């Protein structure tokens, strides 16, 4: 019964958009109306700057982390924890408060991963950082880290099949939500990581 309650609460928490709230409080454009129209940290970075993006990233990550940690404190096993995490993740993708139109889920997935198995989460983050530094493309870094995440969790959870399947489901959803990014990557049109400040600097130099 506790797991079912936490799943419902996790979905509701996941449905709260850190990007939309942050931009509104900071007097920035609604991220759903600019750039990629995605309410996520990368789009906020491009149009709102580093501070707004950092707050968005933290908020979206905590949506995945907090419900899982609460479940862990209440003695829920890893299978139950990943179900709670998936609920928060789906809340971010399909938020009840915003007409079921949400973000792409990477930051919330990171929060879930860190909560379920901290080493699996760290492996994901480390992969993203290395790929982002090398390629300068956020979506590509996220997709590579996402593709490797089921392997990380299979190894680091001693072959917990249900946990790995949960991570695999989240990975598939992330790839699906990145369909337009994948098309842009294949055509060489995907934007590189750049903040509002960086874009303004380039414009000024030109």
Image (spheres, rainbow, N blue to C red):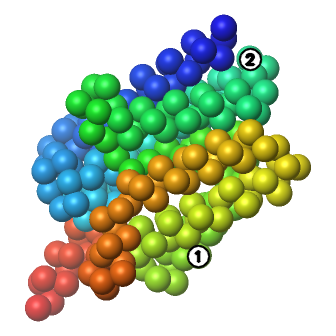
Mark 1: few, some, or many residues within 10 Å (few <14, many ≥20)?
few
The Cα atoms of the two marked residues, 2 and 1, are separated by 35 Å
The answer to whether residue 186 is visible is: yes
Q: Residue at x 38, y 60 (%)?
A: 178
Mark 1 element type: helix
Nearer the observer, 195 or 189: 189
Q: Left or right of 118: which side holds 142?
A: left
Q: Which residue is mark 2?
A: 74
Residue farthest along the bottom direction in this orientation: 206
- Residue 167: image x %, image y %? 64, 47
Nearer the observer, 125 or 84: 84
The answer to whether residue 192 is visible is: no
- Residue 161: image x %, image y %? 78, 44
Q: Residue at x 12, y 84 (%)?
A: 204
Using the image, determine if residue 131 lies above or below residue 28. below
Mark linked to residue 191: none
Mark linked to residue 130: 1
The picture quadrant where one finds residue 185 is bottom left
- Residue 206: image x %, image y %? 11, 91
């Amino acid at each position: 019964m506790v797991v079912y309650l936490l799943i419902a609460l996790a979905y509701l928490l996941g449905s709260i958009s850190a990007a939309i709230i942050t931009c509104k409080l900071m007097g920035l454009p609604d991220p759903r109306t600019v750039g990629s129209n995605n309410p996520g940290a990368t789009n906020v970075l491009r149009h709102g700057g580093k501070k707004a993006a950092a707050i968005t990233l933290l908020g979206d990550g905590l949506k995945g982390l907090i419900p899982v940690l609460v479940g862990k404190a209440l003695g829920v096993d890893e299978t139950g924890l990943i179900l709670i995490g998936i609920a928060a993740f789906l809340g971010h993708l399909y938020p009840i408060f915003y007409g079921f139109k949400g973000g792409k889920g990477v930051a919330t997935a990171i929060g879930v991963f860190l909560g379920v198995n901290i080493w699996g989460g760290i492996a994901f983050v480390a992969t993203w950082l290395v790929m982002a530094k090398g390629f300068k493309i956020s979506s590509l870094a996220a997709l590579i880290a996402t593709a490797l995440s089921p392997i990380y969790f299979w190894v680091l959870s001693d072959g917990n099949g249900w946990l790995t399947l949960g991570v695999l489901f989240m990975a598939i959803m992330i790839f699906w939500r990145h369909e337009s990014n994948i098309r842009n990557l294949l055509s060489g049109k995907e934007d590189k990581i750049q903040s509002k400040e960086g874009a303004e600097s380039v414009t000024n130099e030109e």
